[in-house]
Amino acid sequence: MRQPPSLAPVAALVIGAGGMSSATGVAAQEVQFDLKQLERNGVSADVARFFARRAGFLPGVHQVDASVNGMRREPLQVRFDAQGEPCFSAEVLAQLGLKQDDPEQICAPLQQVHPGTRVELRPGSARMDLVVPATALRDSSAGGAFQRGGSALVLNYDVFSQRVQRRTGNDHSLSARMELGFNTANWAVRSRGDYARRRSQSRYVQQETYAQRALERASALFQAGQLSLASEGFGGTPVVGAQLFSDDMQRQASRLSVPIEGIADSHAVVEVRQRGSVVHRSVVAPGVYSISDIAVTSRGTDLDVEVREEDGRTTRYRVPAPMDVPEADAAPSFQLGVGRYRARDGVHLQGNAPWLVHAGGAMQLHADTRVSTSLLLARDYQGLAAQSGFSLGSRSNWGVGARFSHAAQWGFGHELQLQGNASFDNGLSLGASWQRRSAAFATLEDTLSLRDTRPWPCEPWILQEACASRSERLQQSLSASVGWSSATWGAFSYTFWQSHHGGDVGRGQTLSASRRFGRVNVNLTLQHAQGRGSAAFVNLQVPLGRGSVSARAYRYEDASRNLGASFQSRTAGGLAYNVDASHSGSQQRLAVAANQRTAYGAFNAGISHIQGQAQTQYLAASGGVALASGRTLAFSSSRIGDTFAVVRIPRVAGIGLSGAGSATTSVLGTAVLPSITPYRRTRLQLEGRTLPLNQRFASTTLDLALARGAVATHTISAHPVRQLLLTVRTRGGELARVGTALYSAEGDFIGTVIGQGNAILDNEQIGKPVLLDDASGRCEVHYSVPARFDPARPYEASEGRCL
């Protein structure tokens, strides 16, 4: 934590008061000073009188560490008056966690606000200890209460635009994920949709529109509207209806047991979708990529992956539905839902949409094993799912599951699944995923007559059930990975996958090794995929200044080669950029890409040129905007969840906040902490490296405890700081003696001279007359005030002469 230094408290140490403490509100024994000895040392008798009854802070604003009834609070800024008494404003009381009857209160003795209070001042250690009655505490109950309520409008966005210029014509595409909603009285209303435009065709797909609220007595979440079922076996089924399920407090991003891997020839776009909705999008750099952490996914629904290269080449494939391997010690849970099946926009349902009922639950069998079941009932379709998660040690989680279906014209079918991962102390790690479906196994969509009515049939955003024939359905999928790392030998990994779709069999494998030789990182990857051939990839990375240079070489099964080099770095302002050049046969390519996370959003842009063939540009932006109560507009570089906080630091931009994600204040002095975990205490911290030296902050931390759906709005006041360091000389030209008292024109004691004749003036004291009381009597100190105070410096300096 970095704050503008204040030299005034040093005076207390100089005169020997630093080791003393004082208690206000109780009688204090007056300290007797030898005034004659002090005067011989050049210390004014007024200084002795100021510290005679207590060890006080000098007048002005000081940062102090406070405690209340023995409990530490965050450092805070407190103003002390001419008598050294602290000012307990409404803002200070709030930071101390004390009740306040008058929110407009400017300054009042704490004993008057809360009788029976004891305040001990310890200026030598910049501390203030309070003992208050239990009735004065705002959170008097054990653990404190969770904040509820608050209101705000919310807009989340994720926009991606790409333009490809070729000899044969231009191709421009635009896609946007939009989420609009509001919070009020702990209700959260959200509406999500996807927009896409390609060439002259465009479409909008409405994904969900629902309202939700926590039912705290049942530890559950209630949702109603257009929603997707929360089910461990049939998750993501779209319905119009209502559901009630255990609140798992904002499930974190899913981690695939076996990652999505490949080799990109350019800055390729990787999109992962579930039921037509994008759950992950990223632009990967040329070379090997691996994706395992993705957004929250629906359990029981397959993933559709699309990889688009800059030259227009596209690869599409399907990853079997990921199992949600729960922690073995997770709390019991339940899910209940009822509604009518809802076909996505643009997918026509022939016949009437069926009504359906869903139920599920999970519980502990013993310390290391958890089981769950799910049931889905609809006209002409019944489904049952069972899953068991278990632990084999502290870093090994595995799950086995089965789904059974009975559908008209399909009969009885089943699906078996295994998924898990493990890591060991010797650096070994394992991951596996296996799934097998019988020919008669069917999902609810398989039993419905779905027909695509939009352009671009069978693109990844269309439900595959509306495009694929029964013979193309997945029958079996297997993937496994093993890795080993050592500080001496480097890291090694091997991944294998195989899938059966009807009579087609696909398989692939990847072997990777990496090691550091001095300052050089070397990576070797060998990859083979049926139908796509083999490829070898070598990459060397060498640090250079703030960044690094890497060189790579590919060799494909057809003997074609690709050579490339890139430079990647990051500026002091946080802008990450990459310059890449490659050569493949007669093709030469040059590309530049950059990305930055700002106070207003996350931005990603790039441009590439393939000599004589094509030029590609892309631009991506994502983030969120909130309009909170009091017309407070704030931005986020991440998606805003259903429980969040808006922080306002008036007129101060560029302040970083951390503790619940990260954020930065905009030019409006506002920021959104986008995702607060409900029902847990969270501490937000102002990042010290971003604090300007010319501001004093009322606090540098905030403690939050929010109920689900709450919106917290907090203001941290910031006061401009001007400090002037005077070098004071007496009438004879000598440096003023240490301890010499300083007074205002009105005769108020304002401080003392400290080492080397120095005296510090704060804010309102600057420019006003200053009187020095030395052995020859009082005289006025004449000094000049700088025309500008540099915000990057803690103080300005000036000469002062007593005349």
Image: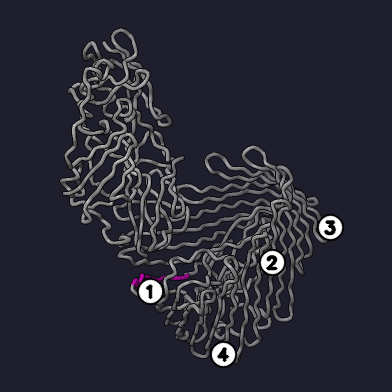
Mark 4 or mark 1: whose residue is earlier in sequence: 1
**Residue at left offset 52%, top offset 57%:** 159
Mark 3 or mark 2: whose residue is earlier in sequence: 2
Q: Residues within 10 Å of mark 1 (few under 14, many from 20)?
A: some
Mark 1 or mark 2: whose residue is earlier in sequence: 1
Quadrant of res 473? bottom right
Mark 4 or mark 3: whose residue is earlier in sequence: 4
Q: Nearer the viewer, residue 787 or 124?
A: 124
Q: What residue does disc 3 label?
A: 559
Q: What residue does disc 1 label?
A: 222
Stretch of the chain drawn in magenta: 207-216
Residue 677 in picture, x, y percent from top left: 42, 61
Between the C-alphas of marks 1 and 3, the distance is: 59 Å
Q: Amino acid at mark 1?
A: Phe
**Residue at left offset 22%, top offset 21%:** 34
Nearer mark to the viewer, of 1 and 3:
1
Numbered circle sitting on residue 406:
4
Relative to 230, residue 265 above or below: above
Q: Residue furthest right?
A: 559
**Whether residue 147 is visible:** no
Is label 3 in contact with label 2 (beta carbons under 8 Å)? Answer: no
Nearer mark to the viewer, of 3 and 2:
2
Between the C-alphas of marks 2 and 4, the distance is: 34 Å
Left/right placement of residue 36 relative to residue 458 reads left
Residue 16 in picture, x, y percent from top left: 30, 27
Circle 4 SS class: strand
**Residue at left offset 59%, top offset 68%:** 393
**Residue at left offset 74%, top offset 53%:** 489
Left/right placement of residue 430 relative to residue 746 reads right
